[in-house]
């Protein structure tokens, strides 16, 4: 499992050495004496909870920020406080979590952006560019056709382009910020192959992540950060996921994901309650059926999990159920009542709650305070005669903040100023803190740290115990398997298979996910 | 909702910290002040280029505006119309919509107020006449505003294009009405209204004698308070601002984006239309073609400089009115068009300074999303 990582002799100069890094933003100390040391030719995992200071540290490395104090050395040269251009020139390449590509341009055009090859003065030589891209593509195993448009690419392919882009600029030290957050299992495996190949070629790779299984699978060494400080630097072969989790969180955690946590054979509620979809058809933007005749029921006291590679219709299914996307044909019922043509607000009133997959674009108004975000969708229950009752809004915020442990515990901060995990807690608190009978939970733990994942999972299990019907969509196969009573795999707008979770495994579902196996949709 | 037994870290008591209001005040105030400073420097250079002393010209400007009751009254009068149009534009902007049509909405409002004043019998009590005229003015502005609102929500037509084009249509229609049907011979205005004449400030304090300032000023302030209350205290305002900030999130929250847009553009028109009373009921007592030309467009600048906050808009209206009146006061030494240049500089400086100063303030204060 672990390859490479030959013991380095003391004479080898570290590719990256950051020491005693302090960085404050006003009252928030993102880094306090953080340090990290990465040897050339290794895959180094930088792990820690959300807000532990990982990204800040890497931004300092990339020249996007200057440290308040401390030293940064790259290949033995003191580069403290350098600029982004100097960092790029020195071969540092950062692949950001959010892609920075021009969707209307081709792969090759994106790669040469800013350094376009020209013939006869002003005419751009795209053929030459495409050849360069193809060559680099073959060398690295990042296979992608140079002439394809970015807007046509899947998330995994777009990420390949991002990695190619930094390599194209001559990067030899790659920093990848949460690269797998948006990838399906097969795409993750491909990424690992590419990273191993780059490492074997002599490149240095830093992986920012908080997924422990990845850390164990791919890295040679690990730096663990907590609350802005470096708490450990360990060899991957000499540690365990439980140990890393304990270091990250500072206490024992149960790694509930991956373990079955629900009792089997529990009775579920009556079949006419909960959520039901009948032969649902939803059209996509290009006039094709993105949901093509899907039927299912989610009973009270049941978690129905939908797995699948992203882009197979899960997003559209949830949007159609939530009332955000028109239904072409079919019916949606909540507790037996047909809500197919009802508005979002009417569905709320019918007992539908929805944790959206993208908290920043859908789930939160980033400029609103936490307190105001906590009443979104239920604002009419917090107002009388059209006036918002700010006392009750605040009381509600105080209560949700303490029961969902939202930090910092200040209801008048804007949602934007919270970390990703705490933003997600605000959404979960709002959607689960009110009266509901059916919950749509879409990627409920995406980009959330271990402690918060555990917490959100427990909330979902508690809700099930209280007889709520829960539809769970997740790109995390182990999350679907751990929480669901029944699982379905979505493939090209249809359910490839529906089976009890007890009979499912990652291997079995994986085949349905990539379409090599098709089964009954009972 | 019971917390997970596995997560013992709760019991953190929620706290309020006072910090955000200071940050917000800094972010609200610093950009306009920086812009003002830039404008002053540009003004200095312009004045110097005319061979005049900046200090002397600025002193004259202040004396001609705030330095005497008449000048101050004129500033207040001009500020009143600008406050209405500024509030109208900012109301639309809060919902994410750019209303360029305040110009024609204001004219339509003034026209409707004049018609109503003509129709009402002479002895109508002022309070009643004012109310009816204001409703008529607001209604007319609202009708003009509802056209782009309907076209946008029904067909997706962009409100900027529609409001700009509608300006031409509405102003031409009004011109046709006046020139063809309603004018007093040899003029381009209607006869004087019978009811709804607002007392001038000069009627209360004789030092304002000759200035056009009138009680519409108080109406403007009341409208600003009402807008503030709606935006920041009412559920409708919560929803309107949500739509303006993140329409997709608003939609997810069960808010009908189209309904909010319809409401926001229509009411933007209502507010602009009500501004018509300042000239018609308060000053000339008739509708005259082109009575406030430019005030609708300047309202965009007022909204921008006032940072889309109702009280900021009032301050900005006062500021722009000062520049405009000040131009007249210094005309003997430098051309009054210099003030138009300065207005332009302020607008450009604010448009530049807002995001830029924000970025710097944020950078200094910092935001961790590590």
Image: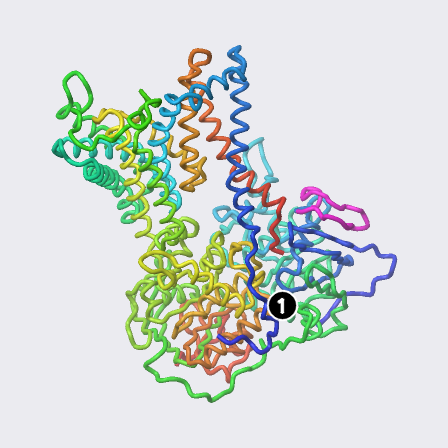
Residue A353: percent from the left, percent from the top? Answer: 40, 69
* Magenta stretch: includes residue A71: yes
Q: Is residue A196 visible?
A: no
Q: Which residue is mark 1?
A: A211
Q: Residue at x 72, y 48 (%)?
A: A67
> Compared to A177, does B228 lie above or below?
above
Q: Is residue B186 visible?
A: yes
So how many labels did they put on this image?
A: 1
Q: Is residue A110 left or right of residue B62?
A: right
**Which quarter of the figure is the C terminus of chain B placed in?**
bottom right
Q: Residue at x 34, y 71 (%)?
A: A293
Q: Is residue A366 left or right of residue A298?
A: right
> Compared to A259, does A378 lie above or below?
above
* Magenta stretch: includes residue B32: no
Q: Decide which of A289, B288 is in the foreground and name it.
A: B288
Please give the chain letter of the residue carrying mark 1: A
Q: Decide which of B176, A255 is in the foreground and name it.
A: B176
Q: Quadrant of residue A356?
A: bottom left
Are there few (<14), some (14-19), or many (20+) residues within 10 Å of tag 1?
many
Residue A345: percent from the left, percent from the top? Answer: 33, 63
> Compared to B32, does B247 lie above or below?
below
The range drawn in magenta is A65-87
**Secondary structure category for the residue under label 1:** loop
Q: Decide which of A319, A459 is in the foreground and name it.
A: A459
> Compared to B9, does B49 lie above or below?
above
Residue A428: percent from the left, percent from the top? Answer: 48, 67
């Amino acid at each position: 499992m672990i390859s490479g990582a030959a013991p380095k002799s003391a004479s080898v100069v570290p590719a990256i050495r950051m020491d005693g890094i302090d960085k404050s933003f006003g009252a928030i100390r993102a880094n306090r004496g953080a340090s990290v040391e990465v040897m050339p030719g290794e895959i180094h995992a930088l792990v820690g909870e959300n807000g532990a200071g990982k990204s800040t540290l890497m931004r300092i490395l990339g020249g996007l920020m200057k440290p308040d104090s401390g030293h940064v050395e790259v290949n033995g040269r003191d580069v403290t406080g350098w600029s982004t251009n100097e960092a790029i020139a020195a071969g540092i390449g950062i692949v950001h979590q959010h892609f920075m590509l021009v969707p209307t341009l081709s792969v090759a055009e994106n790669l040469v952006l800013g350094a376009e090859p020209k013939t006869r003065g002003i005419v751009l030589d795209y053929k030459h560019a495409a050849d360069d891209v193809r060559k680099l593509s073959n060398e690295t195993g990042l296979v992608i056709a140079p002439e394809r448009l970015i807007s046509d690419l899947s998330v995994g392919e777009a990420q390949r382009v991002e990695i190619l882009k930094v390599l194209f600029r001559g990067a030899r030290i790659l920093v990848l910020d949460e690269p797998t957050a948006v990838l399906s299992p097969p795409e993750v495996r491909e990424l690992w192959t590419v990273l191993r190949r780059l490492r074997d070629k002599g490149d240095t790779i830093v992986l920012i992540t908080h997924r422990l299984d990845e850390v164990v699978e791919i890295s040679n060494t690990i730096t663990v950060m907590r609350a802005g400080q470096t708490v450990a630097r360990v060899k991957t072969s000499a540690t365990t996921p439980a140990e890393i989790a304990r270091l990250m969180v500072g206490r024992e955690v149960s790694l509930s994901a991956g373990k079955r946590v629900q009792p089997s054979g529990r009775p579920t509620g009556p079949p006419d309650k909960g959520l039901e979809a009948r032969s649902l058809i939803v059209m996509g933007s290009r006039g094709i059926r993105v949901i093509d005749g899907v039927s299912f029921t989610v009973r009270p006291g049941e978690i129905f999990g939908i797995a699948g590679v992203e882009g197979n219709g899960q997003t559209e299914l949830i949007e159609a159920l939530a009332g955000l996307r028109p239904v072409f044909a079919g019916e949606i019922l909540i507790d037996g009542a047909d809500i197919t043509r009802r508005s979002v607000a009417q569905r709320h009133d019918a007992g539908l709650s929805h944790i959206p997959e993208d908290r920043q674009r859908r789930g939160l108004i980033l400029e609103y305070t936490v307190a105001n975000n906590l009443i979104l969708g239920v604002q009419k229950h917090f107002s009388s005669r059209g006036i918002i009752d700010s006392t009750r809004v605040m009381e509600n915020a105080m209560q949700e903040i303490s029961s969902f442990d939202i930090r910092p515990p200040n209801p008048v901060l804007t949602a934007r100023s919270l970390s990703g995990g705490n933003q997600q807690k605000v959404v979960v608190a709002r959607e689960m803190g009110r009266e509901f009978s059916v919950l749509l939970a879409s990627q409920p733990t995406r980009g959330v740290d271990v402690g918060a994942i555990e917490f959100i999972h427990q909330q979902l299990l508690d809700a099930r115990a209280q007889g709520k019907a829960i539809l769970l969509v997740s790109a995390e196969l182990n999350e679907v398997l751990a929480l669901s009573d029944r699982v379905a795999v979505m493939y090209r707008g249809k359910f490839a298979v529906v089976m009890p979770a007890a009979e499912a495994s990652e291997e079995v579902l994986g085949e349905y996910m990539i379409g090599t196996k098709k089964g009954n949709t009972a | 909702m019971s917390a997970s037994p596995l997560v013992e870290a709760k019991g953190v008591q929620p706290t309020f910290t006072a910090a955000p209001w200071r940050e917000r005040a800094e972010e609200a105030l610093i950009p306009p002040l920086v812009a003002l400073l830039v404008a002053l420097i540009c003004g200095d250079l312009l004045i110097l280029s005319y061979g005049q002393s900046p200090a002397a010209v600025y002193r004259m400007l202040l004396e001609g505006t705030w330095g005497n009751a008449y000048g101050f009254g004129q500033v207040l009068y001009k500020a009143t119309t600008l406050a209405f149009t500024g509030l109208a534009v900012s109301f639309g902007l809060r919902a994410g919509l750019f209303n360029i049509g305040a110009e024609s909405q204001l004219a339509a409002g003034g026209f409707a107020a004049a018609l109503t004043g003509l129709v009402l019998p002479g002895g109508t009590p002022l309070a009643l006449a004012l109310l009816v005229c204001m409703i008529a003015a607001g209604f007319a502005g609202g009708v003009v505003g509802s056209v782009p609102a309907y076209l946008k929500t029904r067909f997706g037509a962009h409100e900027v294009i529609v409001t700009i084009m509608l300006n031409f249509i509405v102003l031409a229609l009004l011109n046709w009405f006046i020139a063809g049907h309603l004018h007093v011979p040899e003029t381009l205005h209607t006869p004087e209204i019978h009811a709804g004449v607002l007392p001038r400030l000069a009627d209360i304090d004789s030092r304002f004698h000759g200035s056009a300032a009138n009680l519409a000023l108080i109406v403007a302030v009341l409208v600003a308070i009402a807008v503030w209350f709606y935006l920041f205290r009412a559920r409708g305002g919560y929803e309107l601002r949500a739509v303006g900030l993140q329409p997709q999130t608003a939609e997810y929250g069960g808010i009908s984006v189209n309904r909010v847009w319809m409401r926001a553009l229509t009411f933007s028109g209502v507010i602009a239309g009500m501004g018509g009373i300042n000239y018609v009921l308060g000053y000339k007592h008739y509708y005259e073609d082109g009575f406030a030309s430019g005030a609708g467009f300047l309202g965009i600048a007022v909204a921008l400089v006032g940072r889309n906050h109702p009280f900021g808009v009032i301050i900005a209206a006062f500021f722009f009115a000062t520049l405009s009146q000040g131009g007249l006061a210094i005309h003997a030494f430098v051309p009054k068009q210099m003030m138009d240049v300065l207005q332009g500089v302020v607008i450009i400086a604010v448009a530049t300074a807002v995001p830029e100063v924000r970025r710097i303030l944020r950078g200094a204060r910092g935001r961790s999303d590590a």
